Amino acid sequence: KLQKCRLERIGQIYGPSVSKELLPLRLKTNNEKLEKKTSQFHMECDILYSNANYKAKKTTFILFINGRLVECSQLKRAIEIAYQSVLPSSSREKPFVFLSMKLPFKDVDVNVHPTKREVHFLHQEEIVERVQTALEKALVKSNSARTFTVQTLLPGGQEKLNGKKIHKGEEGEKEEEEEEEEGLA
């Protein structure tokens, strides 16, 4: 129910075209073994991430930790890396990710920046790695269903494809052959 409410809010703020392309992902860890080290940490994450069909010119990363809007450059970079395996390298498409994370309050350091927007937290590297890995796996699964928009050629459009341009004016239709400009040195 909370995810549905978040999707509705994102749709109201960023538009329905954004919210319809988002997929949910939930992570919960507690005293898990990561990279041959036993880490004693607890984390809960609710993530809404854009699928491969989403198109934007810049990355949108919204991060809430314990209900507070914050920034974490290391986490944002990990998310961008996770999307590199799905989005073509020549692509200018960027992801949209909403991440709500719950951590023990004692593990969050908000005194990194004077405005308290940038945060660091205990076990940051392991948590960032865990989020990145889970997102990469989810993206690979969701990437199998890409959709493409096809535009139908309207009547009269064929003339333009054949190198002719049709101008409509007061005298009626007038055809002009399009000429390629040759550069003069």
Image (cartoon, rainbow, N blue to C red):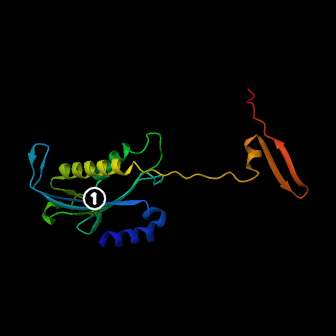
Q: Determine whether 43 is above or below 13 in the image.
A: above
Q: Residue at x 18, y 49 (%)?
A: 126
Amino acid beneath label 1: Glu
Question: Quadrant location of the N terminus?
Answer: bottom left
Q: Position of residue 118 (x, y in %)?
A: 27, 58
Question: Quadrant location of the C terminus?
Answer: top right
Q: Is residue 138 left or right of residue 105?
A: right
Q: Residue at x 18, y 63 (%)?
A: 103
Q: Is residue 150 left or right of residue 31?
A: right
Q: Position of residue 127 (x, y in %)?
A: 20, 53
Q: Determine whether 160 is above or below 19 in the image.
A: above
Q: Camera-side residue: 90 or 138?
A: 138
Q: Position of residue 147 (x, y in %)?
A: 48, 52
Q: Camera-side residue: 39 or 105?
A: 39
Check disc 1 and report its element: helix, strand or loop: loop
Q: Quadrant of residue 70?
A: bottom left
Residue 15 visible, this orientation? no
Q: Determine whether 57 is above or below 64 in the image.
A: above
Q: Camera-side residue: 26 or 117?
A: 26
Question: According to the image, label 1 marks what residue?
Answer: 118
Label 1 CA crowd tier, 10 Å (few <14, some 14–19, many 20+): some
Q: How many numbered circles are shown? A: 1
Residue 10 visible, this orientation? yes
Q: Residue at x 62, y 52 (%)?
A: 151
